Protein backbone atom coordinates (compact mmCIF):
# COMPACT_ATOMS: atom_id res chain seq x y z
CA UNK A 1 0.00 0.00 0.00
CA UNK A 2 2.67 2.47 1.04
CA UNK A 3 4.80 1.58 -2.00
CA UNK A 4 1.78 2.29 -4.23
CA UNK A 5 1.35 5.67 -2.54
CA UNK A 6 5.05 6.42 -3.04
CA UNK A 7 4.79 5.40 -6.70
CA UNK A 8 1.77 7.67 -7.26
CA UNK A 9 3.48 10.58 -5.49
CA UNK A 10 6.56 10.17 -7.65
CA UNK A 11 4.45 10.12 -10.81
CA UNK A 12 2.51 13.23 -9.76
CA UNK A 13 5.79 14.97 -8.99
CA UNK A 14 7.12 14.04 -12.45
CA UNK A 15 4.00 15.40 -14.13
CA UNK A 16 4.28 18.60 -12.14
CA UNK A 17 7.97 19.02 -12.95
CA UNK A 18 7.27 18.38 -16.62
CA UNK A 19 4.57 21.06 -16.53
CA UNK A 20 6.86 23.48 -14.74
CA UNK A 21 9.49 22.93 -17.41
CA UNK A 22 6.94 23.45 -20.15
CA UNK A 23 5.96 26.80 -18.70
CA UNK A 24 3.55 26.42 -15.82
CA UNK A 25 1.71 24.19 -13.39
CA UNK A 26 -1.82 24.08 -14.64
CA UNK A 27 -3.90 24.45 -11.51
CA UNK A 28 -7.04 24.83 -13.61
CA UNK A 29 -6.82 21.11 -14.44
CA UNK A 30 -7.34 20.08 -10.83
CA UNK A 31 -10.72 18.60 -10.01
CA UNK A 32 -10.95 19.38 -6.37
CA UNK A 33 -9.05 21.40 -3.80
CA UNK A 34 -7.67 18.82 -1.34
CA UNK A 35 -8.82 18.86 2.29
CA UNK A 36 -5.29 19.63 3.51
CA UNK A 37 -5.64 22.95 1.73
CA UNK A 38 -9.31 23.70 2.27
CA UNK A 39 -9.79 23.05 6.01
CA UNK A 40 -8.60 26.54 7.01
CA UNK A 41 -11.51 27.93 4.98
CA UNK A 42 -14.09 26.02 7.02
CA UNK A 43 -15.96 27.67 9.87
CA UNK A 44 -18.39 26.92 12.65
CA UNK A 45 -21.04 29.51 12.00
CA UNK A 46 -19.05 32.73 11.74
CA UNK A 47 -16.09 31.41 13.75
CA UNK A 48 -13.00 29.91 12.14
CA UNK A 49 -12.59 26.25 13.14
CA UNK A 50 -10.82 25.68 16.47
CA UNK A 51 -7.94 23.94 14.68
CA UNK A 52 -6.96 27.33 13.27
CA UNK A 53 -6.44 29.01 16.66
CA UNK A 54 -4.54 25.92 17.84
CA UNK A 55 -2.28 26.22 14.80
CA UNK A 56 -1.78 29.98 15.41
CA UNK A 57 -0.84 29.36 19.03
CA UNK A 58 1.65 26.64 18.10
CA UNK A 59 3.04 28.00 14.83
CA UNK A 60 1.88 31.47 13.66
CA UNK A 61 3.66 30.60 10.42
CA UNK A 62 3.32 26.92 9.58
CA UNK A 63 3.90 24.64 6.62
CA UNK A 64 0.32 23.60 5.90
CA UNK A 65 0.99 20.96 3.33
CA UNK A 66 3.06 19.98 0.38
CA UNK A 67 0.80 19.95 -2.65
CA UNK A 68 1.98 18.83 -6.09
CA UNK A 69 5.46 19.11 -4.64
CA UNK A 70 4.99 22.75 -3.66
CA UNK A 71 5.29 23.80 -0.02
CA UNK A 72 2.24 25.79 1.07
CA UNK A 73 2.72 28.01 4.13
CA UNK A 74 -0.14 29.41 6.18
CA UNK A 75 0.43 32.57 8.23
CA UNK A 76 -2.10 32.95 11.05
CA UNK A 77 -0.28 35.41 13.37
CA UNK A 78 -1.08 39.13 13.09
CA UNK A 79 2.53 40.38 13.19
CA UNK A 80 3.74 37.65 10.83
CA UNK A 81 0.94 38.35 8.32
CA UNK A 82 1.71 42.08 8.36
CA UNK A 83 5.38 41.31 7.75
CA UNK A 84 4.54 39.22 4.67
CA UNK A 85 1.92 41.59 3.25
CA UNK A 86 4.17 44.65 3.67
CA UNK A 87 7.18 43.03 2.00
CA UNK A 88 6.71 43.51 -1.73
CA UNK A 89 10.45 43.18 -2.39
CA UNK A 90 10.55 39.55 -1.30
CA UNK A 91 7.20 38.29 -2.65
CA UNK A 92 5.47 38.24 -6.01
CA UNK A 93 1.68 38.17 -6.47
CA UNK A 94 1.91 37.04 -10.08
CA UNK A 95 -0.06 33.80 -10.28
CA UNK A 96 0.19 33.44 -14.04
CA UNK A 97 3.08 30.97 -14.06
CA UNK A 98 0.79 28.63 -12.04
CA UNK A 99 -2.13 29.02 -14.42
CA UNK A 100 -0.83 27.08 -17.39
CA UNK A 101 0.10 30.25 -19.26
CA UNK A 102 2.66 32.96 -19.00
CA UNK A 103 0.79 36.21 -19.01
CA UNK A 104 -0.13 36.33 -22.66
CA UNK A 105 -3.02 38.54 -23.57
CA UNK A 106 -5.30 35.68 -24.55
CA UNK A 107 -8.77 35.89 -22.98
CA UNK A 108 -8.75 33.00 -20.39
CA UNK A 109 -5.70 34.51 -18.79
CA UNK A 110 -6.02 36.53 -15.65
CA UNK A 111 -4.38 39.68 -14.49
CA UNK A 112 -5.86 42.51 -12.48
CA UNK A 113 -4.32 44.24 -9.51
CA UNK A 114 -4.37 41.37 -7.05
CA UNK A 115 -2.23 39.13 -9.25
CA UNK A 116 0.15 41.79 -10.55
CA UNK A 117 3.56 43.00 -9.41
CA UNK A 118 5.28 46.38 -9.74
CA UNK A 119 5.90 48.18 -12.00
CA UNK A 120 2.73 46.92 -13.74
CA UNK A 121 0.77 46.98 -10.46
CA UNK A 122 1.88 50.54 -9.65
CA UNK A 123 0.83 51.80 -13.08
CA UNK A 124 -2.57 50.05 -12.99
CA UNK A 125 -3.35 51.03 -9.41
CA UNK A 126 -2.51 54.65 -10.21
CA UNK A 127 -5.25 54.61 -12.86
CA UNK A 128 -7.78 53.33 -10.37
CA UNK A 129 -6.97 55.32 -7.24
CA UNK A 130 -8.54 58.64 -8.36
CA UNK A 131 -11.89 56.84 -8.75
CA UNK A 132 -11.76 55.84 -5.09
CA UNK A 133 -10.86 59.08 -3.33
CA UNK A 134 -13.20 60.09 -0.51
CA UNK A 135 -14.28 63.12 -2.53
CA UNK A 136 -15.44 61.07 -5.51
CA UNK A 137 -16.97 58.37 -3.34
CA UNK A 138 -18.89 60.88 -1.25
CA UNK A 139 -20.63 61.88 -4.46
CA UNK A 140 -21.90 58.30 -4.69
CA UNK A 141 -23.34 58.37 -1.14
CA UNK A 142 -26.82 59.69 -2.07
CA UNK A 143 -27.02 57.10 -4.86
CA UNK A 144 -26.02 54.36 -2.40
CA UNK A 145 -28.68 55.57 0.05
CA UNK A 146 -31.30 55.43 -2.73
CA UNK A 147 -30.22 51.90 -3.77
CA UNK A 148 -30.46 50.78 -0.12
CA UNK A 149 -33.94 52.27 0.30
CA UNK A 150 -35.07 50.61 -2.96
CA UNK A 151 -33.91 47.21 -1.70
CA UNK A 152 -35.59 47.74 1.68
CA UNK A 153 -38.82 48.31 -0.27
CA UNK A 154 -38.14 45.10 -2.15
CA UNK A 155 -37.63 43.17 1.10
CA UNK A 156 -41.00 44.42 2.24
CA UNK A 157 -42.81 43.61 -0.99
CA UNK A 158 -41.19 40.15 -1.42
CA UNK A 159 -41.95 38.92 2.12
CA UNK A 160 -44.25 35.94 2.50
CA UNK A 161 -45.98 35.77 5.86
CA UNK A 162 -43.54 38.40 7.05
CA UNK A 163 -40.45 36.32 6.13
CA UNK A 164 -37.96 37.15 3.39
CA UNK A 165 -34.49 35.97 2.36
CA UNK A 166 -32.10 38.87 2.95
CA UNK A 167 -29.54 37.58 0.40
CA UNK A 168 -31.37 38.07 -2.92
CA UNK A 169 -33.38 41.07 -1.76
CA UNK A 170 -30.75 43.13 0.06
CA UNK A 171 -27.25 41.77 0.73
CA UNK A 172 -26.47 40.97 -2.94
CA UNK A 173 -28.34 43.65 -4.89
CA UNK A 174 -27.03 46.59 -2.84
CA UNK A 175 -23.29 46.11 -3.60
CA UNK A 176 -24.12 44.74 -7.03
CA UNK A 177 -26.01 47.86 -8.08
CA UNK A 178 -23.36 50.07 -6.49
CA UNK A 179 -20.55 48.38 -8.48
CA UNK A 180 -22.56 48.43 -11.71
CA UNK A 181 -23.02 52.17 -11.19
CA UNK A 182 -19.36 52.62 -10.38
CA UNK A 183 -18.22 50.71 -13.47
CA UNK A 184 -20.94 52.10 -15.74
CA UNK A 185 -22.31 48.71 -16.86
CA UNK A 186 -25.51 48.57 -18.89
CA UNK A 187 -28.59 46.94 -17.35
CA UNK A 188 -28.68 43.98 -19.74
CA UNK A 189 -25.25 42.73 -18.56
CA UNK A 190 -26.09 42.68 -14.88
CA UNK A 191 -27.53 39.17 -14.39
CA UNK A 192 -24.59 37.48 -16.16
CA UNK A 193 -22.20 39.41 -13.99
CA UNK A 194 -24.05 38.41 -10.87
CA UNK A 195 -23.71 34.71 -11.68
CA UNK A 196 -20.05 34.94 -12.65
CA UNK A 197 -19.26 36.80 -9.44
CA UNK A 198 -20.62 34.15 -7.13
CA UNK A 199 -19.18 31.09 -8.97
CA UNK A 200 -15.73 32.54 -8.81
CA UNK A 201 -14.99 32.25 -5.13
CA UNK A 202 -16.45 28.81 -4.52
CA UNK A 203 -13.50 26.42 -4.28
CA UNK A 204 -15.71 23.37 -3.63
CA UNK A 205 -15.45 22.50 -7.33
CA UNK A 206 -11.68 22.81 -7.49
CA UNK A 207 -9.57 24.76 -9.95
CA UNK A 208 -11.92 24.22 -12.87
CA UNK A 209 -14.88 25.99 -11.22
CA UNK A 210 -12.90 28.80 -9.68
CA UNK A 211 -10.60 29.64 -12.57
CA UNK A 212 -13.24 28.81 -15.20
CA UNK A 213 -15.44 31.52 -13.71
CA UNK A 214 -12.49 33.90 -13.71
CA UNK A 215 -12.08 33.39 -17.45
CA UNK A 216 -15.82 33.87 -18.04
CA UNK A 217 -16.09 37.16 -16.20
CA UNK A 218 -12.89 38.40 -17.82
CA UNK A 219 -14.22 37.61 -21.30
CA UNK A 220 -17.42 39.43 -20.47
CA UNK A 221 -15.60 42.52 -19.29
CA UNK A 222 -13.34 42.49 -22.35
CA UNK A 223 -16.51 42.81 -24.42
CA UNK A 224 -17.89 45.61 -22.22
CA UNK A 225 -14.55 47.45 -22.48
CA UNK A 226 -14.39 47.06 -26.26
CA UNK A 227 -17.89 48.53 -26.57
CA UNK A 228 -16.94 51.50 -24.41
CA UNK A 229 -13.81 52.27 -26.45
CA UNK A 230 -16.00 53.74 -29.15
CA UNK A 231 -18.63 55.19 -26.79
CA UNK A 232 -17.17 55.73 -23.30
CA UNK A 233 -19.88 55.60 -20.62
CA UNK A 234 -20.27 57.60 -17.42
CA UNK A 235 -18.70 55.06 -15.04
CA UNK A 236 -15.16 54.05 -14.13
CA UNK A 237 -14.45 52.18 -17.38
CA UNK A 238 -15.50 55.16 -19.52
CA UNK A 239 -13.66 57.60 -17.26
CA UNK A 240 -10.37 55.69 -17.57
CA UNK A 241 -10.82 55.42 -21.34
CA UNK A 242 -11.40 59.18 -21.56
CA UNK A 243 -8.47 60.16 -19.32
CA UNK A 244 -5.93 57.39 -19.95
CA UNK A 245 -7.22 55.53 -22.99
CA UNK A 246 -3.83 55.58 -24.73
CA UNK A 247 -1.97 54.14 -21.76
CA UNK A 248 -3.99 50.99 -21.24
CA UNK A 249 -4.98 48.00 -23.38
CA UNK A 250 -8.52 46.58 -23.39
CA UNK A 251 -7.13 43.49 -21.70
CA UNK A 252 -5.63 45.42 -18.78
CA UNK A 253 -8.65 47.68 -18.39
CA UNK A 254 -10.96 44.65 -18.37
CA UNK A 255 -8.68 43.12 -15.72
CA UNK A 256 -8.99 46.24 -13.59
CA UNK A 257 -12.76 46.29 -13.96
CA UNK A 258 -12.85 42.57 -13.18
CA UNK A 259 -10.85 43.11 -9.98
CA UNK A 260 -13.18 45.91 -8.95
CA UNK A 261 -16.29 43.93 -9.76
CA UNK A 262 -15.38 40.67 -8.07
CA UNK A 263 -13.43 42.43 -5.31
CA UNK A 264 -16.38 44.55 -4.38
CA UNK A 265 -19.40 42.32 -4.90
CA UNK A 266 -19.07 39.10 -2.96
CA UNK A 267 -17.16 40.75 -0.14
CA UNK A 268 -19.69 43.50 0.60
CA UNK A 269 -22.62 41.08 0.08
CA UNK A 270 -21.15 38.73 2.68
CA UNK A 271 -20.54 41.60 5.08
CA UNK A 272 -24.15 42.74 4.74
CA UNK A 273 -25.57 39.25 5.24
CA UNK A 274 -23.30 37.97 8.00
CA UNK A 275 -23.10 41.39 9.66
CA UNK A 276 -26.89 41.51 9.88
CA UNK A 277 -26.96 37.99 11.34
CA UNK A 278 -24.42 39.01 14.01
CA UNK A 279 -26.31 42.22 14.83
CA UNK A 280 -29.58 40.33 15.19
CA UNK A 281 -27.81 38.12 17.73
CA UNK A 282 -26.82 41.33 19.57
CA UNK A 283 -30.07 43.33 19.64
CA UNK A 284 -28.61 46.23 21.66
CA UNK A 285 -25.95 46.77 19.01
CA UNK A 286 -28.57 46.46 16.24
CA UNK A 287 -30.69 49.16 17.92
CA UNK A 288 -27.61 51.35 18.48
CA UNK A 289 -26.69 51.53 14.78
CA UNK A 290 -30.11 52.94 13.86
CA UNK A 291 -29.34 56.52 14.86
CA UNK A 292 -25.94 56.79 16.56
CA UNK A 293 -23.20 57.74 14.05
CA UNK A 294 -20.34 56.91 16.47
CA UNK A 295 -21.84 53.48 17.15
CA UNK A 296 -22.16 52.87 13.39
CA UNK A 297 -18.47 53.54 12.81
CA UNK A 298 -17.31 51.34 15.71
CA UNK A 299 -19.72 48.55 14.79
CA UNK A 300 -18.71 48.51 11.12
CA UNK A 301 -15.01 48.24 12.07
CA UNK A 302 -15.67 45.48 14.60
CA UNK A 303 -17.82 43.53 12.13
CA UNK A 304 -15.10 43.82 9.50
CA UNK A 305 -12.53 42.42 11.94
CA UNK A 306 -14.74 39.80 13.54
CA UNK A 307 -16.14 38.42 10.28
CA UNK A 308 -13.01 38.83 8.11
CA UNK A 309 -15.05 37.64 5.14
CA UNK A 310 -11.98 37.57 2.89
CA UNK A 311 -10.56 34.63 4.76
CA UNK A 312 -7.13 34.49 3.15
CA UNK A 313 -4.93 36.82 1.14
CA UNK A 314 -3.99 36.25 -2.46
CA UNK A 315 -1.07 33.80 -2.50
CA UNK A 316 2.39 35.32 -2.20
CA UNK A 317 5.31 33.70 -4.04
CA UNK A 318 8.74 34.20 -2.38
CA UNK A 319 11.33 35.49 -4.86
CA UNK A 320 14.17 34.15 -2.70
CA UNK A 321 14.59 32.58 0.74
CA UNK A 322 12.81 34.74 3.32
CA UNK A 323 12.93 34.48 7.09
CA UNK A 324 9.56 35.04 8.82
CA UNK A 325 9.81 34.76 12.62
CA UNK A 326 11.75 31.50 13.09
CA UNK A 327 10.84 29.96 9.72
CA UNK A 328 12.40 30.21 6.29
CA UNK A 329 10.23 30.13 3.19
CA UNK A 330 11.93 29.47 -0.12
CA UNK A 331 11.60 30.43 -3.75
CA UNK A 332 9.04 28.05 -5.27
CA UNK A 333 6.95 27.94 -2.07
CA UNK A 334 3.53 29.56 -1.71
CA UNK A 335 2.68 31.76 1.30
CA UNK A 336 -0.94 32.47 2.24
CA UNK A 337 -1.94 34.87 5.02
CA UNK A 338 -5.02 33.82 6.95
CA UNK A 339 -6.66 37.20 7.57
CA UNK A 340 -9.48 35.79 9.71
CA UNK A 341 -6.91 33.97 11.85
CA UNK A 342 -4.65 37.02 12.18
CA UNK A 343 -7.63 39.23 13.08
CA UNK A 344 -8.34 37.06 16.10
CA UNK A 345 -4.74 36.81 17.27
CA UNK A 346 -4.83 37.18 21.11
CA UNK A 347 -1.48 39.01 20.92
CA UNK A 348 -3.58 41.91 19.53
CA UNK A 349 -5.72 42.20 22.65
CA UNK A 350 -8.14 40.38 24.92
CA UNK A 351 -11.31 38.66 23.78
CA UNK A 352 -10.52 38.81 20.06
CA UNK A 353 -12.60 35.67 19.49
CA UNK A 354 -15.76 37.58 20.43
CA UNK A 355 -17.81 40.42 18.91
CA UNK A 356 -17.54 43.62 20.92
CA UNK A 357 -18.11 46.98 19.21
CA UNK A 358 -17.33 48.66 22.52
CA UNK A 359 -13.70 47.47 22.59
CA UNK A 360 -10.81 49.89 22.12
CA UNK A 361 -10.41 49.80 18.33
CA UNK A 362 -7.43 47.85 17.01
CA UNK A 363 -6.15 48.04 13.48
CA UNK A 364 -7.29 44.94 11.60
CA UNK A 365 -6.37 43.12 8.40
CA UNK A 366 -9.86 42.67 6.95
CA UNK A 367 -8.83 44.84 3.96
CA UNK A 368 -5.31 43.39 3.84
CA UNK A 369 -2.18 45.44 4.42
CA UNK A 370 0.55 47.20 2.44
CA UNK A 371 0.80 47.46 -1.27
CA UNK A 372 -2.22 45.35 -2.26
CA UNK A 373 -4.48 46.67 0.51
CA UNK A 374 -8.07 46.86 -0.68
CA UNK A 375 -8.57 49.76 -3.05
CA UNK A 376 -12.33 49.72 -2.30
CA UNK A 377 -12.05 49.93 1.51
CA UNK A 378 -13.54 53.43 1.70
CA UNK A 379 -16.40 52.50 -0.62
CA UNK A 380 -17.14 49.36 1.42
CA UNK A 381 -17.18 51.41 4.64
CA UNK A 382 -19.63 53.87 3.10
CA UNK A 383 -21.91 51.06 1.87
CA UNK A 384 -21.94 49.27 5.21
CA UNK A 385 -22.29 52.54 7.13
CA UNK A 386 -25.36 53.43 5.06
CA UNK A 387 -26.94 49.95 4.85
CA UNK A 388 -26.92 48.68 8.47
CA UNK A 389 -28.50 51.84 9.96
CA UNK A 390 -31.12 52.04 7.18
CA UNK A 391 -32.03 48.39 7.82
CA UNK A 392 -32.25 48.96 11.59
CA UNK A 393 -34.43 52.05 11.11
CA UNK A 394 -36.81 50.42 8.61
CA UNK A 395 -37.12 47.11 10.48
CA UNK A 396 -36.38 47.77 14.17
CA UNK A 397 -37.94 44.43 15.12
CA UNK A 398 -36.10 42.35 12.49
CA UNK A 399 -35.23 38.85 13.65
CA UNK A 400 -33.69 35.68 12.23
CA UNK A 401 -36.41 33.33 10.99
CA UNK A 402 -36.46 29.66 11.96
CA UNK A 403 -33.75 27.66 10.19
CA UNK A 404 -31.79 30.89 9.96
CA UNK A 405 -28.38 31.20 8.35
CA UNK A 406 -27.33 28.80 5.64
CA UNK A 407 -23.55 29.32 5.57
CA UNK A 408 -21.54 28.83 2.41
CA UNK A 409 -18.94 26.05 2.64
CA UNK A 410 -15.20 26.45 1.85
CA UNK A 411 -15.25 29.75 0.07
CA UNK A 412 -12.30 32.11 -0.06
CA UNK A 413 -14.87 34.83 0.63
CA UNK A 414 -16.93 33.43 3.48
CA UNK A 415 -20.65 34.11 3.29
CA UNK A 416 -24.17 32.78 3.41
CA UNK A 417 -26.32 31.07 0.77
CA UNK A 418 -29.51 32.33 2.37
CA UNK A 419 -30.58 34.36 5.38
CA UNK A 420 -34.31 34.19 6.08
CA UNK A 421 -35.42 37.04 8.32
CA UNK A 422 -38.76 37.97 9.86
CA UNK A 423 -39.75 41.60 9.37
CA UNK A 424 -42.71 41.08 11.65
CA UNK A 425 -42.92 44.00 14.05
CA UNK A 426 -42.05 46.53 11.34
CA UNK A 427 -44.59 45.16 8.84
CA UNK A 428 -47.16 44.77 11.61
CA UNK A 429 -46.82 48.48 12.36
CA UNK A 430 -46.79 49.41 8.69
CA UNK A 431 -49.94 47.48 7.77
C1 LIG B 1 -16.18 44.66 2.98
C2 LIG B 1 -15.80 44.57 1.75
C3 LIG B 1 -14.41 44.22 1.29
C4 LIG B 1 -13.45 43.46 1.88
C5 LIG B 1 -13.52 42.72 3.21
C6 LIG B 1 -12.30 43.47 0.99
C7 LIG B 1 -11.10 42.82 1.25
C8 LIG B 1 -9.96 42.91 0.46
C9 LIG B 1 -8.67 42.35 0.80
C10 LIG B 1 -8.37 41.56 2.05
C11 LIG B 1 -7.81 42.67 -0.19
C12 LIG B 1 -6.30 42.39 -0.24
C13 LIG B 1 -5.95 40.96 -0.54
C14 LIG B 1 -4.47 40.71 -0.50
O1 LIG B 1 -3.65 41.62 -0.26
O2 LIG B 1 -4.07 39.58 -0.71
C15 LIG B 1 -8.55 43.39 -1.20
C16 LIG B 1 -8.03 43.85 -2.38
C17 LIG B 1 -8.78 44.46 -3.34
N1 LIG B 1 -10.09 44.87 -3.23
FE1 LIG B 1 -11.31 44.64 -1.63
N2 LIG B 1 -12.58 44.21 -0.11
C18 LIG B 1 -13.85 44.72 0.03
C19 LIG B 1 -14.52 45.56 -0.84
C20 LIG B 1 -14.03 45.98 -2.03
C21 LIG B 1 -14.70 46.88 -2.93
C22 LIG B 1 -16.06 47.55 -2.65
C23 LIG B 1 -13.92 47.00 -4.03
C24 LIG B 1 -14.12 47.79 -5.28
C25 LIG B 1 -15.20 48.41 -5.61
C26 LIG B 1 -12.73 46.18 -3.81
C27 LIG B 1 -11.69 46.03 -4.71
C28 LIG B 1 -10.46 45.45 -4.41
C29 LIG B 1 -9.34 45.41 -5.33
C30 LIG B 1 -9.33 45.95 -6.77
C31 LIG B 1 -8.28 44.78 -4.66
C32 LIG B 1 -6.87 44.52 -5.20
C33 LIG B 1 -5.95 45.64 -4.74
C34 LIG B 1 -4.50 45.44 -5.16
O3 LIG B 1 -4.08 44.31 -5.35
O4 LIG B 1 -3.79 46.45 -5.24
N3 LIG B 1 -12.83 45.59 -2.59
N4 LIG B 1 -9.85 43.54 -0.76
Image (cartoon, rainbow, N blue to C red):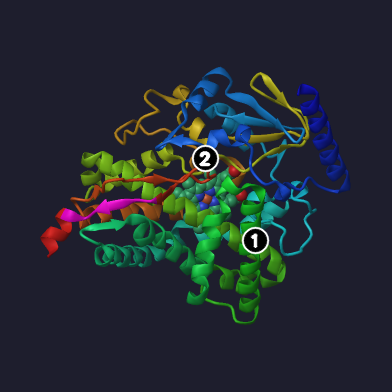
**How far apart, in angstroms, are the residues tagged by discs 1 and 2?**
22 Å
Res. 258 image quadrant: bottom right
Q: Secondary structure at mark 1?
A: helix
Residue that carries the numbered disc 2 in the rendered image = 311
Q: Is residue 129 visible?
A: no
* Quadrant where the C terminus is found in the figure: bottom left
Residue 29 located left or right of residue 59: right
**Side of 363 where 85 appears, left or right:** right
Q: Look at the picture and state if 285 lies above or below 429.
A: above
Q: Position of residue 272 (x, y in %)?
A: 37, 51
Residue at 31% x, 52% y is 420
Q: Residues within 10 Å of mark 1 (few under 14, many from 20)?
A: many
- Displayed quadrant of residue 427: bottom left
Q: Is mark 2 within 8 Å of ligand 1?
A: no
Disc 2 crowd, CA 10 A, few/some/many (<14, 14-19, 20+): many
Residue at image coords 24%, 62% = 160
Q: Is residue 268 left or right of residue 20?
A: left
- Mark 1 residue CB less than 8 A from any atom of ligand 1: no
Q: Residue at x 41, y 65 (%)?
A: 140
Residue at 44% across / 23% down in the picture?
346
Image position, residue 88 (x, y; %): 68, 40
Question: Number of labelled discs?
Answer: 2
Q: Is residue 288 above or below residue 225?
A: above
Give, as a single range, the part of the protein colored magenta: 418-424
Queried whether the magenta region covers residue 422, the answer comes back as yes
**Disc on the earlier residue, 1 or 2:** 1
Residue indicated by mark 1: 255
Residue 224 screen position, x and y as percent: 60, 73
Please name which of the two marks, 1 or 2, marks the residue nearer to the observer: 2
Amino acid sequence: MSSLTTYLRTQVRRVVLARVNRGGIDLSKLDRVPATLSWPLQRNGVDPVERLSELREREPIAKLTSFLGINIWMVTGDAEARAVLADTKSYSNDIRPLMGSRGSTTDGDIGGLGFTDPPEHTALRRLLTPEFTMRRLERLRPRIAAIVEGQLDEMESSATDGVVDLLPTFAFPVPFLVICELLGLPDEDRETFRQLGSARFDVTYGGQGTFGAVSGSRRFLMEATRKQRSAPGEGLIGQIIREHGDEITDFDLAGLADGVFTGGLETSASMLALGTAVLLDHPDDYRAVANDAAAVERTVEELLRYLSVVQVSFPRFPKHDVQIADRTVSKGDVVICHLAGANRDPRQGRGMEGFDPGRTPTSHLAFGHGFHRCVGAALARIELGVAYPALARRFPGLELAAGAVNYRPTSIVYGAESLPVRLAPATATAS
